Image (cartoon, rainbow, N blue to C red):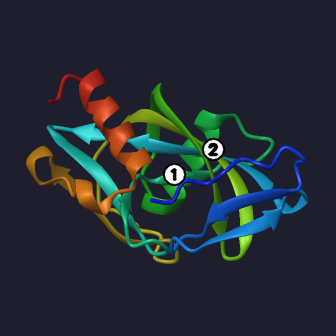
Amino acid sequence: MVMAKPPSPAGRWVTCPDLGGHVRQYPAAEVKFRPAAYGIWWHEGRVLLSRSRFTHLWDFPGGGVEPFEWMPDGLQREFQEETGALVTVGELIHTAESFIAFFGRPFHSLRFYYLVTGMPQEWTRAVDELEDLKWWDQAAIPWQAMNPEDREALAQSAKRLKIF
């Protein structure tokens, strides 16, 4: 993964990759702040992963939090929008920061990863955002098809819960 560079000392440009890994510079004034919350749900030794329609990588349900929302509230809303599931938000276990461009617009991304719990159910997958939604046994987790920040968050969650 290409790491983005923070703004230059003059604060005029930000270098960041887009979802396809193409790197370019953007005027710092165009960069929007994007806090996001993601839920890591372990149940009976399996973890719920979602496959992004945009990156085709496996990650976690969740997404951008609105300016008026607390992180846990935004996570509950995003999780329900993407999966149909109502979850209880637990411990914050990992954070990640990067600069990335979505569809030609640059963002300063702060991601907060929480443990979540709920009742496993039939999913109502958000087809406009997700290609797939699946429970993975720990031995079959697609580590290589996840971005480094998500791999680290998943490892931290497993360590915290003493899963492996």
Residue lying furthest front: 9
Front in this rendered view, residue 40 or 154: 154
Where does residue 4 sit, x and y in percent of width and height?
61, 54
Residue appearing at x 34%, y 57% in the figure: 146
**The quadrant where residue 26 appears:** bottom right
Residue lying furthest left: 139
Q: Secondary structure at mark 2?
A: helix
Quadrant of the image for the C terminus? top left
**The quadrant where residue 45 appears:** top left
Question: Relative to 123, is 44 above or below?
Answer: above
**Left or right relative to 121: residue 61:** right
Crowding at mark 1 (Cα within 10 Å: few <14, some 14-19, many 20+): many
Give whichever of discs 2 and 1 has the lower sequence position. 1
Are circles 2 and 1 on residues that touch, CB within 8 Å?
Answer: no
Q: Secondary structure at mark 1?
A: strand
Residue appearing at x 66%, y 66% in the figure: 101
Front in this rendered view, residue 131 or 140: 140
Label 2 sits on residue: 74
**Left or right relative to 151: residue 96:** right
Where does residue 151 sit, x and y in percent of width and height?
33, 46
Q: Looking at the picture, which amino acid does disc 2 mark? A: Gly
Question: Relative to 1, is 89 above or below?
Answer: above
Where does residue 68 sit, x and y in percent of width and height?
80, 41
Report the disc number at residue 62.
Answer: 1
Crowding at mark 2 (Cα within 10 Å: few <14, some 14-19, many 20+): many
Where does residue 152 sit, x and y in percent of width and height?
36, 39
